[in-house]
Every structure is written in C-alpha cells, then in structure tokens.
Amino acid sequence: MGDISRLLADHGPAFWQALLLTWKLTAFSFLPGFLLGVVVTVLRLLPLPPLRFVLTGYVEIFRNIPSVALLIFIVFALPDLNVVIDYEPSVVLALTLVCSAFTADYLRAGINTIAGSQIEAALSLGMRPMQIISAVVLPQALRSVVQPMTSLLIALMLSTSLASQVPLAGRELTALVSKIANDSAAGMAAFAVAAALYVATGLLIAWAGAILEKKLRILR
C-alpha cells in the first residue's frame, strides 16, 4: 500500500488524465460505431443484393481483422497514400470500424429472433418496408442486444490500450504504466493502479448495462 500511496502522490494527476483519455477514446469510438452499425444493419435489410454483398464483406472484414493491425495500417500505411490522420483520431477510427462491424452482427442476430408473424402482421396493415424496419424490427432487435452491446463496450474500453502502440507519449493509461515502469521501480504498483482503474470502469459499464437491460425488459 505504501508503494501505491507514493505512486499516486507522484503520478496521481497523470493517472487521472490517462483515465479521462481512456473514457474519451471509448465514448468517441462507441457512439459513432454503434450508429454506423445500425445504419449498416438497416441497409442490409433492403432487397438490394449487391449492397448486401458489399456490407456483408464490410462486417466480416472489420469483425475479423485484429484491431492492432487495423491501427498500424491507419497510422503507418495510409500516409503512403497521402492520407495522414493524427494519432488520437487514428485510434478512434480503428475502434469505430471494429465496433460498427460487431454492432451490425449483433443486431442481425437480434433481428433473427423476431417472429415472422410480426412482419406479416405489419404488411397486412399496409406498412412499408422502412416503416416495418423502424417501428417493428429495429426496436426489438436493439432491446435484445443490450447484453452483448454492454460486453462490446467493455471490450472497446479495454482496447483503448492500443493507443500505447502509437506515439501518444504516455498520455494513455497503458503507455503511462510502461513509462513509469521504465523510469522507476514502481512498475508493479503502477500496473496494479491501472488494473484497478480498468476493472472499476468495466464494472461501472456492466452495472449500467444491467439497469438498461432490466428497464427495456419491463417495457416489452
């Protein structure tokens, strides 16, 4: 405990700033990734085989490519194509693409749980395809994927440690721990503090997800 107390006294503000960056990268990746995943899901429902083929390829590529490989491509390969993105937006872009692919996949699974009789009933009422998607299909699919989306958000938060692979100069939590471990003998204490911050954030997300899932279940 003494080592951790001394560590926090010396590096407490740096840990706080690193934690804020972790939250920022998580939020800025999850929100656009979620919205993009919803758009991809809706477009895959349209009766346009070429579009479905392209979007299915998009989902499969970004769902299976390692996030670190995607980040390295964005940071080090895109400049050869005269596309230069700052380090922080590069991390956000990589995680957003991965998040959108998993979101689209989870929503597709949620849509598959909807009874076909509901679609038939909506058609018999004269609803158009986009009306059925927005009023019948999508709301139920979103409710059914709260738990996997919560897990995805936690995984995304942990994946922000990828920022340590690009020159964010100790501003990211994992990079800060590595810097402290290299500069002093407080490596174990630094890793313990970082682990506690990651666990606390993950538990907070899981708690919020459980509350949201319970409320949506009551609304069904």
Image (spheres, grey):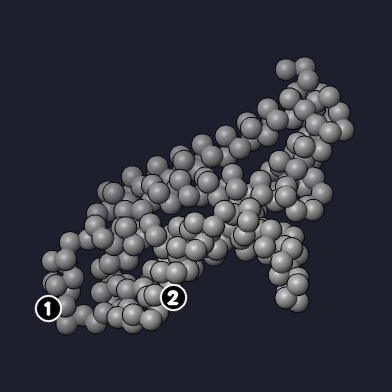
Dot 1: within a 10 Å radius of its alpha carbon, few (fewer than 14), some, or many (20 or more) residues? few
- Name the residue at 72% across, 76% down: 81
Q: Position of residue 16 (x, y in %)?
A: 73, 41
Query: Within the image, what quadrant is residue 121 found in?
Result: bottom left
- Name the residue at 41% across, 69% down: 56
Label 2 sits on residue:
54
Query: Within the image, what quadrant is residue 103 found in?
Result: bottom left
Q: Position of residue 82 (x, y in %)?
A: 76, 76
Label 1 sits on residue:
124
1 and 2 marks in contact (CB < 8 Å): no
Q: Is residue 47 left or right of residue 102?
A: left
Q: Is residue 99 left or right of residue 5?
A: left
Mark positioned earlier in the residue sequence (1 or 2): 2
- Name the residue at 55% across, 50% down: 156
Q: Is residue 140 left or right of residue 117?
A: right
Q: Is residue 45 visible?
A: yes
- Asked if 58 appears above or below 187 in the picture, the reply is below
Point out the image quarter for the N terminus: top right
Q: Position of residue 184 (x, y in %)?
A: 86, 28
Q: Is residue 29 visible?
A: no
Point out the image quarter for the C terminus: bottom left
Closer to the observer: label 1 or label 2? 2
